[in-house]
Each structure stands twice: as structure tokens, then as C-alpha cells.
Image: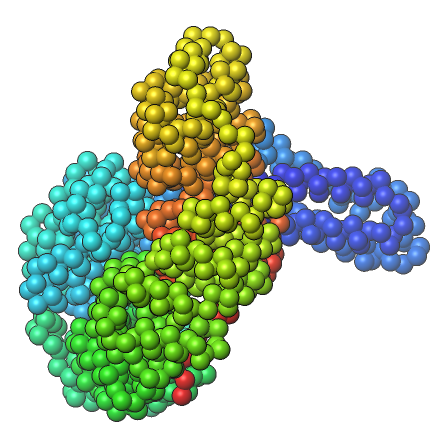
Amino acid sequence: MDALQVVSSAMQIVSSMVAAIGSLEQASRNLDDAPKRIRILEEFVSELENLVRKTGQKHVYKLHDSRLECQIQSLNHLIERLHPNITKARRVVSKSKFKNLAKVVWNSMAGDPLGKIFISIQYDLNWWIESQKLSRDVENVIESTARNITSRLKVNTDQGYPMSSKCSFVRRMLEKADSHDVILIVGLSGIGKTCLARQVASDLPSKFVDGAVELRFGQWCSRAACNGNTAEYQRRLTRKLSKFLVQIGFQKKLQDEHCRDLEYIGCLLQEALYGKSILVLLDDVWEQDIVERFAKLYDNNCKYLVTTRNESVYEITEAEKVEMSKDDIKEISKAVLIHHTLLKEEELPDVAETLLERCGHHPLTVAVMGKALRKEVRAEKWEKAISDLSTYATSAPGPVSYVNEKEAETTVTIFGSLEFSLEVMPEDSRRLFIAFASLSWAEPLPEACLEAIWSVIGQESLFPLTVCKLVEGSLLMKTDGTSVYQVHDMVSLYLNSKENDSVGMLLTESTAGKSAFISPWLFIFGNDAVKIVSEKKIESSLSSSEEKQAIIVLEAIIQAFMTSESISEIEATRAGFSRILGPKIGDLMSAASQSLVAASAKAIINIFTRADFSNYFPSLETTGAVDNLAGILQDCDDPMVQTNISTILAKLAELGSPGTVNKVLQTIPLSQLADFLSPTGDEWHDSVFTILMSLIKAGKSKAVERMLASEIDKSLIRLLESGSDVAQHHALIILKSFYELGGPSTNGSLGPGILKLLPWQARLGLEKFVLSDQNSLPSPKPQTFDDIIRIMLDNSDNQIVEAMQDLIPIVEKAGEPRIRDMILKSPLVKRLSELLQGNQEQHLLKTESAFVLMKLACSGGEPCIKKILEYDIIQELVKIMQCDIPELQDSAYTTLHQMLFGQGGVLILNQMFQLGQIDRLVNLLESKSAKTREVSLNCVLDVVEVGKKICLERMFSLQVVEKLARIEKASGGSGETVVGLLKGISKCKHLTTAERWVMKQQVVRKARAAIKGHKFETRVMAAIDACLSEGSKGASSSRRMKR
């Protein structure tokens, strides 16, 4: 049960408690029954406590509203009043177990202690029920208030950083009506600028009704980091601003965060913040124009809190400046030290003040030293730490060029504290930290990347313990609730000085196999200099005479590639690997080693797009690759290798000459593919469907004839009868292709008798082929059509319904040019649109209108779809899906479903996306009406199946997974809705195999987080795991390097 229904059922629980009290009063006088009934009351109270907790979690960003807070407090007060009375009741029953006293207690409820307690509990429950006057419908007691409250963006504060007087000063500046829109917080590195800004943003003045949001830029987003390359700087800035738009929930017009024009993003910023009152925290800004882009936005009540240590940013004139000085941090440094040492103030040695002075009271240095001295109370250990800090600071590497000269002393002190922290750590943690110097820390990094680094230098099983030591020492930061890591900018600066040591450890001094394994990871996640070295290492491994090195690097490419967490990330990564693999594809595919060819085929299938295949595959016809692949295929009995090599051959045929097509058709074992299409062979289905579609495109009717001879059509029909939803979907597509290209000969395997046994979706998709010669209708006469239109325009409802029924045979012939032109020139679509928008009382007219529109869209194709889109028909269908008449809702959904899956369905989808109808459907998943939720869910899953990447990413940004998880909680936790989303992703033809995998992993992560701790968690996650395992047997690969 989700938070909405949990909170809304509070009244039901309380009412049940009242009934339980009544049953106690009317119960048998048997004392043995009393403890059990009291336990029931205790369980009710426990349920109420869970309600309050879950409500607070769901509406964490709305608890600033006094009305919602008051309602939740009323439940808390009720719980506080119930606990003492139930405890007293249990005590009375416990004392009354003596036989004589039992008779006394149960002889008369009136006046006895237990009876008085029950009456008191009943009074408390009735008091609470009467106090709820918000709505007659209990479901809205709390939720109705929350629904009308604007969500408030929130910034979390740093643990261990206490409130300072400077924080109160900045807060007062923000509250002033005449203050500048920009407040600059300036100061040395590690002095606590970001911590101060987060403290302010986490406890906002009430004027910021829309909350606060943080956006970190870092030195990565600066002209200096781009070596003066303006285009690269603008690309990075565009990426940051795009992520900001996603953070504040403004993604409607945002399509690709990496490829948008910077000025266009500026326009979106203006639109996104229009009328808003948000405190925007711009952290670690290095360029003046970044601040100016925000400051020039108008028609909003936003303020911009900017942290920077770059002097050029100081020069902004239209800004308030707040400088962090040593005096500001001196007042809080001791509290920071206490927090990180886990000591009480009285336990600190006297020398602690000396340590603080040596640290310059800088919060970062104090935190690092504090964690290194955790729970240490011996003064001599502290004195040694002070001495070591001075030694390390003296020998620490000097700051690099872009650090302000004023910061030199501070920087070496911070570097010294990092050296000291590393010195007291275990050797494994120290080596791992140095290895991180090869990585780019401009963005948080996934745990899989760090784990790959560790696999080169340490024992696999020790990774959790090793990385935990770095987190505990403040050298590494892990984002709560995620598996991503980041470092403080000063730690990143320190790591820059260790880059050569790291490269030597990972690429130069390690074995050939280890360096081959880690190079793809560094190519994706390494800093700019390391990426260049890694690319050369990948190329040399692929060209190496050592077959094992090439196989290791190819497997690592797939593993690193699959760690991408979004489509935009995977596309950027794919482009890099494609550039490396493309020129070498001829050599790889012509290699004598079966293992190397198999590994290459798997990598190419995952990495290459259609454009890549077109660019690099034609050259393979002249290198003997086709013959080599054919030979390996004949000698191989490994299903994984068979499907991968067959996929490559099928792609070669799709792009090759007629001679190549014939050779591939003769080589690929179609009978073996037919066996792979058994209903229980889910792990091979996706690959086989890809192979068949490529062969059909290449060989057309000739390919279909060979497939029919191999009885692949019978295997597809068996899938339609008993395969999974995904398998049925793909089998239907291929069978349609068979009928379109194979003609009447295909009917031998699928007649009307078998057709009736198939699922309705399959019958609907295939009946026009199987039954094409039956019940054929003569071409309608134009004058008959005119008569029908005249009746539809001028007559009563009953006559219009009859006319529409006479119209259906004509509309079904809309595929004929003459009939289609006649329909398009008539006012038919306009009239149907008007009827569709009529009163709900005319539901028969609306239903018939929807049915005729569906037939017209499916029969007439794109020309008719374009005509339909001239009117508000799609919007009206979505609107009807929200009405309270189930027949109308089903009719609207069925019409939209058929339109989406018919010819020209992409036009329907585009309009839905542009007009915000996809947003509306996702939001309807939280409708109070069960029927509305049902049809909206079905339509959402349809959009996932037919949609493009931008549609799916939009849905993820609207929290579609979290909404589905709430449906699971409310509906018994079968996992069906989330599994439906996963299956829709599997069916989506606009995604590559790798993109499907990445999106499925996103679904799993989000679903697990949304349902964590719920009583249905195990059941839902088991259903998800079962769904994923259906197609993973043949595709799984170790995430670790094989040693």
C-alpha cells in the first residue's frame, strides 16, 4: 500500500479500533481472551505509527505547510494518548491472572479498571474521528491537502558542520527586500564556502516558496580546463545547465542535454524560472559569465548564492559579497573536530587547540585530521599527528597553476593532512586512492568503475572494506542511497599530482592482461590525458599478437560500456569505442581464432549503431570475413557464439551485395534458429529475432522461402500460442513480414482454425492476411458515402449511429487511393471530432466515433493520421480515458492503442509528446479511479513499446517507475506493473540491445529504492528478477576480469 492509501486509510484503522473496543465490551468474560484482544489494539497502534512515518517520507518536500503538518500531528497526538492506556490495560490483565481476581474483573465491566481503560481508549478514538473535518471521503483527510501544496525543492546540509554567525548573516541578507539577486561567498579552498551555502539553503527564509536547488560547476566547467577552446567550454556549460533544468523538473522541451545550443538552453532557463521563487546555489563557479546568465533572468523572485575562489568572479559588480575569513571558521572548527573524532569535548586532549591552529581551522583539513584521530584520546598521538602534518605539508607537492597564489599555504596544509590520513590507512586503501588519480572527478563516478580499478591492484573480495576506509577518512564521498562516489575539489587537486604514479600502477607496471582490462574503463572515466594513453593501449591490445589481450580488452569494453546510467551517457561512450573498433573490424572478423572472432562479434553487436554498420561493414566483403565467419559458424556448437556470428552475418547481408546475401542465406543454420525459438528459449529470442529481420530485409521473398522451408513459421506460431508477451510481440512482427513477402504460400501453416486459437492481439494483426479472400466487400459508391455524411451532419443520434455503422465498410477500404481521397476531402473527420467531444450522456455516439476513427487510422495510414491530427482528437481520447464510464474509457484506450501501433503511429506519438499528453498519462497513474489507472497504465506501456528514447527518458523524469511501485504497494505486490514496463522496453524497436539493458537497470534501481522496506518488497523484486532472467542467460558476462 503506497503512502497515499496508507494515510487515507487512517480513518479506517481508527474505526476498526473502535469496533475492536466494542467487541471487548461484548466479549466473553473469559480472561484468557483479553490479552489477545489487547494485542490487536497494539497492532492497530503500530499500523498508525507506520502511517505517520510513511507519510513523512512521501511528503518530505511539503512539510513546510502548516496545514499538512497539523494533520499529521493530530495522528501523533492520538498515538501518544493510546500508548499509556493500552499499557495500563496490559498491566491490569497481567495482575488479574489470579483466579479470584479474574472473577472480580470480568463480572462487571462498569467501574472496573479494565473497563475504564477501554472507555478512555474509545473516547480518544472518537475524538480523533470527529476532529477530521476536511472531507467526507476519508481518502482525502491528509492527501487532499498535500495535493494542493507546491513541492519545495530541497538542499541537504553537510553533517558535522554546525550553524555559524556567518550563516545567520547570509540569511538576513536574503530576507532583505532591497538586496542584490546575487550573493557571492568567497574564500580560500577548504574554508567551508559550500558547507555555509548548504546550511543557508537547507533552512530557507519563507519567501522562497519553491525551495532551493544546488548546481555544482567545478573547475571542469571553465575555459582554463578547456585550454581556451570556446566550443568545448560551451558544450560543458550546456551540459551543466541542462542537468539543472532536469533537477527543477523542467524537461518538457529538453531533448538532448549534450547536443543543445547554449543560447537555446538560456531561453529554457528563462521559461523554467518564470514566476518562481527559488534559492539557487551555484557551487564552485569559475567563470563570470555563468553567474551573469542567471542574474539576467527576469520575472522571477529567485536569488543566487554563489561560491567561488576565482578572483575573476569576484569582479561582478551587481552582487553582495560575503568573505569567509579565519575568524568565521574558528568559531566552528572545534565542533567539526569533535564530530569527526567521535569524542566529547571534555575527552579532547589539551593539545587539540594546537592541532586546530596548525590546520588553520579549515573545515576540510580539520575533518581529515579528525577522522585520522578517530576515538584517539592519548595526547602523544595528537602531538605526533601535529608534527607529521607539518612534515607532510612541507614536502607536499606545490599547487598547480590555476590555484590562487593566496591559497598556496592553505593548499599545502590540506595536502599535508591528506598525506597524513593516507599514512595511517592500510596499504590497500592507500594504493587504491593513488590509483584514483587517473580518473576524472568532474562528475560522480559509478561504483563499478572504482571496483574495476581495484581489481587490477587488489583482491576482489576486499573492495567493500578498502573503499569504506577512504570514505571514513573523508578522502572519498559516497552519495546517500546511490552507488556513486565523488571527491572534494581540493582532494581532486591533490590527486592531479599523483597522476603519473596512478598511470604507472594501472597501465605501465601491471601485467599485460590487467592493463588491457583497465584501459576501456580509463577511456570512459579517465581524465583527458589518461584517456589518450588508454586509447593507445586499447588499440595496441587489439593489434597484439597475443590473442588473450585482445579478448580481455573486448570483454572489458562491453563491461565498461554497460555501466552507463543514461541513454545520453551510453551514446557518448559508444561513439568513442566505435571510432576505435571500426577501422579494425576487418582484421578482427578475419582472425583465425574462434574465441577472438566471437568476442569481437559480441562487442560489435553491443557497440555499433546502424550508421556504424553502414560505414564499416561494406569493406568486409573484400577481406574474406564472410567466408571466415561462415567457417566458424559451421564448426561451432556454442549457442552464444552461433547467435552472435549469425547476427554479424545477417547485418553483412543487409548491407552487402546480392552475392553476399545468397552466401549468408546458405550459411546461417535456419533450422537451428527455429529450435532456438522454442517457448522456453527466452535467452536466445532477442538475437534470433534480430537475425531474422535483417535476413528478411536483405533477401526479401527469397529469405522468407528459406525460412518457411526450415519451419521457422511454425516456431513463431508456437510462440504466439504459449510464448512470453515480448516473444509474442516479435513473432507477430516477423509473421506479418512473412505474409507480406511470402504471399499465399504462407497460409499453409496458419489457417482460420489456428487463427482463432491465438491471443486477440495476434488475431487482430494477422486476420487481414489469413482472411483476406473471405467476406470481401465491393468498392462503395461515392454517392452512398455522400448520403452517409449528410445523415451524420443533420440527423438524430440514433440515425447518426446507424450511419456510422454503414460507414465502417467504406472506412475499411481507406487504403485504396480513391476511397482515401474521397474521405479526406469530406467533413467526416471534423464531424467525428465534434461527436467525440460531445456530452458524456451521448456515450454511444462517442464510442462509435472513436471506433470509426480507429478504423480510419488503421486502414488509411499516414494521410488519414495527418488529417486526424488537425483536430483535438488525441487530446480528447486521453480526456475520455479519465471519465467515469468504463465503456467509454475502454473505447478511448482501444482507439489510441490501435492508432499508436498502426501505420503512422509515430505521428500520433510525436503529437502526444509535444502537447504534454505523455506527461498527463504518467500523472494519471496516481488517479483515485481504479479504471483510470488501468487504462492509463496500459497506454503508458504502449508508449514505452512504440516510443523513442526521448519519450522514455521523459517518462523516467516524471518518476514513472516510482508511480508504478506505488501501484504495486496498493495492489498486492505481484510485480506485474513494473514487469510490464520492463517488457515494454524489451519490445521497443527504437532501442539497441545495450540501451535496453541500461534502461532496465534504471528501472530496477528506481523500483528497488521505491519499494525498499515495504512488506511486498521481496515479492515485487522476485518478479522483476524473474523477468530479467528470462533473456539474460545467454547475455550475462562477468563484471570482473578473468585472471
Compared with 518, 752 (above or below) is above
**Residue 487 drawn at (x, y percent):** 28, 71
Q: Would residue 443 be visible to someone looking at this image?
A: no
At 60% from the left edge and 51% from the top edge, which residue is drawn? 721
Residue at the front extreme? Answer: 745
Q: Nearer the viewer, residue 12 or 909?
A: 909
In the displayed structure, does residue 802 sit left or right of residue 195?
Answer: right
Q: Nearer the viewer, residue 536 or 99?
A: 536
**Residue 807 drawn at (x, y percent):** 46, 20
Q: Quadrant of the C terminus?
A: bottom left
At 24% from the left edge and 53% from the top edge, which residue is drawn? 257
**Residue 571 drawn at (x, y percent):** 28, 61
Compared with 32, 626 (above or below) is below
Q: Nearer the viewer, residue 452 or 1026?
A: 1026
**Residue 894 drawn at (x, y percent):** 50, 34
At 26% from the left edge and 67% from the top edge, which residue is drawn? 617
In the displayed structure, does residue 774 sit left or right of residue 119?
Answer: left
